[in-house]
């Protein structure tokens, strides 16, 4: 009796994909409040940086600092 190895390989790759999907969803569930707070702060700081990207620039030498 011959086995269809292509079917078997396809089945294993499907199982591997579903395991990755499950493991990634488990990782996402472990997100803590601190992580969410840091992401929110990063988003706010990025918005401020975007607003100031075209703003006035002040040249300063390192000796002035």
Image (cartoon, rainbow, N blue to C red):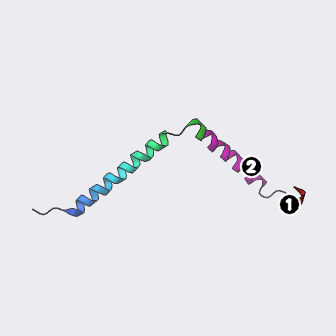
- In the picture, measured across the screen, residue 52 lies left or right of residue 9, that is right
Q: Residue at x 28, y 56 (%)?
A: 12
The reply to whether discs 1 and 2 touch (Cβ–Cβ < 8 Å) is no
The dot on residue 48 is: 2
Q: Dividing the image into 4 quarters, which one contains the N terminus?
A: bottom left
**Tag nearer the camera, 1 or 2:** 1
Q: Answer whether residue 59 is visible to the viewer in this image.
A: no
Q: Quadrant of the C terminus?
A: bottom right
Kindly report the distance in space between the C-alpha atoms of the residues bearing marks 1 and 2: 25 Å
Q: Decide which of tag 1 and tag 2 comes sooner along the chain.
A: 2
Report the side of 31 relative to 64 (left or right).
left
Element assignment for label 1: helix
The residue shown at (40%, 48%) is 21
Foreground of the two, 63 or 34? 63
Q: Which residue is more in the foreground, 38 or 55?
A: 38
- Quadrant hosting residue 59: bottom right
Q: Position of residue 54 (x, y in %)?
A: 79, 58
Residue 46 belongs to magenta span? yes
Q: Position of residue 57 (x, y in %)?
A: 85, 59
**Residue 42: x and y, percent?**
66, 46
Up/down of 57 relative to 32, above or below:
below
Residue sitting at 34 percent across and 53 percent down? 16
Which residue matches tag 1? Answer: 62
Element type at mark 2: helix
Report the disc number at residue 51. Answer: none
Magenta stretch, residue numbers: 36-60
Q: Residues within 10 Å of mark 1 (few under 14, many from 20)?
A: few
Q: Is residue 5 left or right of residue 21?
A: left
The 10 Å Cα crowd at callout 2, few under 14, some 14 to 19, many 20 or more, is few
Residue placed furthest toward the front: 63
């Amino acid at each position: 009796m011959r086995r269809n190895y292509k079917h078997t390989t396809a089945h294993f790759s499907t199982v591997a994909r579903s395991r990755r999907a499950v493991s990634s969803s488990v990782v996402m569930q472990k997100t803590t409040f601190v992580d969410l707070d840091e992401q929110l702060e990063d988003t706010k700081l990025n918005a401020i940086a975007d607003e100031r990207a075209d703003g006035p620039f002040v040249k300063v030498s390192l000796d002035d600092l």
